[in-house]
């Protein structure tokens, strides 16, 4: 079955530290990959997406993600965390032949001063 | 700015009293989605419209219905809300299906409280 796994429902980092949020998917065919961010009581905002162009994708707010086919991963990183990055992050996958996105369970990012 | 608008942002209803949530878009997208999101969970797709074609998810309760009178508007009707229907309801649009890599653009959501 097509699935998306985000390792770690909660991640806590210090301000200025590296942010790494993990996402793995199950598919033999490279899918379309998205990262969304959700702030409290708001909708989802697109951070970045991979659609088979460059494997390193740069997004908004200093985030980037690297598609690794051999590892079926699309981890999200940011070199230096800011307090404003505290939010819920969702990895989502559009599998070939499917009309809907499959979401990971989300990772809540907390930034410590 | 082109956007997805949801009204109201907060809705309080009574147990069993029908309620309608609305979504409008200025993106001229042909696909519109309704998601239910409960606390600390991922959004759960209820149904979507591809133009006028309605696509219901297999596990969406019959209590949930939807209407799309034109390209710009889409409504979510909950015929008899139960306490378990209290959630954030998110509307999203896209210019095509997820299978072709189209981005979904989300509205701010409507938080529904059932008393």
Image (tube, coloured by chain):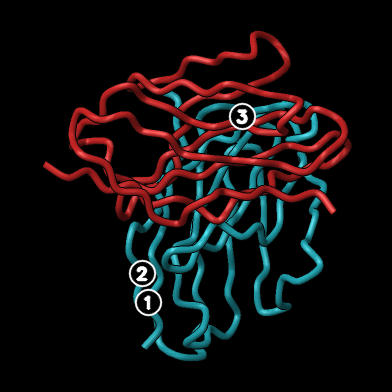
Please state the total of marks drawn on the protein image: 3
- Inter-mark Cα distance, 1 to 2: 6 Å
Tag 1, which chain?
Answer: B
Shown colour of chain A: red
Query: How many residues crowd around disc 3 within 10 Å: few (fewer than 14), some, or many (20 or more)?
Result: many
Q: Residue at x 45, y 19 (%)?
A: A59
Sequence-first tag of 1 and 2: 2
Are dots 2 and 3 on a single chain?
yes
Provide the residue designation for mark 2.
Answer: B11
Query: Residue B78: x and y, percent?
Result: 58, 75
Residue B113: assigned label: 1
Query: How many residues crowd around disc 1 within 10 Å: few (fewer than 14), some, or many (20 or more)?
Result: some
Do the CB atoms of the residues marked 2 and 3 lie less than 8 Å apart? no
Provide the residue designation for mark 3.
Answer: B103
Give the chain letter for cyan: B
Return the residue nearer the eye: B91 or A64. A64
Are dots 1 and 2 on a single chain?
yes
Tag 2, which chain?
Answer: B
Q: Furthest residue to the left?
A: A113
Do the CB atoms of the residues marked 1 and 2 lie less than 8 Å apart? yes
Q: Residue at x 44, y 31 (%)?
A: B3
Tag 3, which chain?
Answer: B
């Amino acid at each position: 079955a097509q699935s998306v796994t985000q390792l770690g429902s909660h991640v806590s980092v210090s301000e200025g530290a590296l942010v790494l949020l993990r996402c793995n998917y199950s598919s033999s065919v490279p899918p379309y990959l998205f990262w969304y961010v959700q702030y409290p009581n708001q909708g989802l905002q697109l951070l970045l997406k991979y659609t088979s162009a460059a494997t390193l994708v740069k997004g908004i707010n200093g985030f980037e993600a690297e598609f690794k086919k051999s590892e079926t991963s699309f981890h999200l990183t940011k070199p230096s965390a800011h307090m404003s990055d505290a939010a819920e992050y969702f990895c989502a996958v559009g599998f070939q032949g499917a009309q809907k996105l499959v979401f990971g369970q989300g990772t809540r990012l907390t930034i410590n001063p | 700015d082109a956007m997805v608008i949801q009204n109201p942002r907060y809705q309080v209803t009574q147990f069993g009293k029908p309620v309608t949530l609305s979504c409008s878009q200025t993106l001229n997208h042909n696909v519109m989605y309704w998601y239910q999101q409960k606390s600390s969970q991922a959004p759960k797709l209820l149904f979507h419209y591809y133009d006028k074609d309605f696509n219901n998810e297999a596990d969406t309760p019959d209590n949930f219905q939807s209407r799309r009178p034109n390209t710009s508007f889409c409504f979510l009707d909950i015929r008899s809300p139960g306490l378990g229907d209290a959630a954030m309801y998110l509307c999203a649009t896209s210019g095509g299906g997820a299978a072709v890599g189209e981005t979904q653009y989300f509205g701010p959501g409507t938080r529904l409280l059932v008393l």
